[in-house]
Each structure stands twice: as structure tokens, then as C-alpha cells.
Amino acid sequence: MPTTTSSLALQTARLFYERAEQLLAAAAPEERKIALVILDVERFKTINDSLGRQEGDALLKQIAERMSQNDDGSSRIARISADHFAVVGRGAQSEDEVRAPR
């Protein structure tokens, strides 16, 4: 099984879950915090149905690129389903640290 999706250079859901479990296991003994963010692309089916799969794929690629641009290398980013992305990272002290800039 590949470790990245063919259309997006992101980890597959399976690898993502493995890495998230590793981060949780490593953080627990020292009571360190980690952040888990799930991004749901609202109305993605509507986008696919009205604009076509090519446009839907282009949107997903753009989302993935933007998420990757904001990664400092300490996070794990994956597309975990058709319209859901997930990010897990270590070292967050508060919710403000994991919020995306507006």
C-alpha cells in the first residue's frame, strides 16, 4: 500500500493514524500536549457535481498545498477521506497556537 495518495503528496490515512498513535504514545508519559485538527471541506460533493471532478481535484490539491505551506515540518498532514484532511502536531500549548491565520 502506498504511503502517499497519488493525487496529493500527503500521507495516506493509514500512515497518518500510525504516526498519530506514535505521537500520542510518546507524549503521554511526559504529559505533553499534541494538537489534532480535522478539516471538513463543506459542500465538496456539490462542487464535484456542479463543476466536475477535475475542478474538485484541483480544489483538493490547492487545499493540500496551502496546508503544507503552513507546516513547519513537525506536523503530519493527511487526506483521510474524500473531503476530510487531518493534521496532528506536537508541542502545542494552547488552541491559539494551532489556529490558522485569518
Image (tube, rainbow, N blue to C red):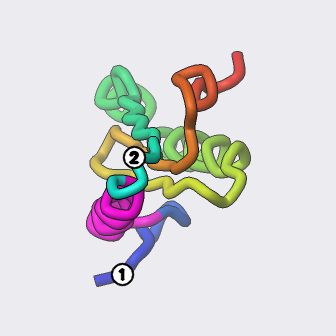
Q: Which type of secondary structure does the marked residue at label 2 adopt?
A: loop
Q: Position of residue 50 (x, y in %)?
A: 38, 25
In front of the other: label 2 or label 1?
2
Which image quarter: residue 6? bottom left
Point out the image quarter for the C terminus.
top right
Q: Is residue 99 above or below residue 3?
A: above
**Real-space Cα separation, disc 2 to disc 1, in angstroms:** 33 Å
Tag 1 residue? 2
Q: Position of residue 44 (x, y in %)?
A: 36, 29
Point out the image quarter for the N terminus.
bottom left
Report the side of 51 relative to 21 (left or right).
right
Q: In the depicted view, which residue is nearer to us: 21 or 100?
A: 21
**Residue lying farthest to the bottom in this orientation:** 1
Tag 2 residue? 31
Q: Which contiguous range is marked in magenta?
A: 11-27
Give the amino acid type for the residue marked by disc 2 in the picture. Glu
Residue sitting at x 63%, y 29%: 97
Precedes in sequence: disc 2 or disc 1 = 1
Residue sitting at x 45%, y 42%: 33
Residue sitting at x 40%, y 43%: 85
Whether residue 13 is in magenta: the answer is: yes
Give me the disc on residue 26.
none
Residue sitting at x 45%, y 39%: 35
Whether residue 93 is in magenta: the answer is: no
Q: Position of residue 56 (x, y in %)?
A: 45, 40
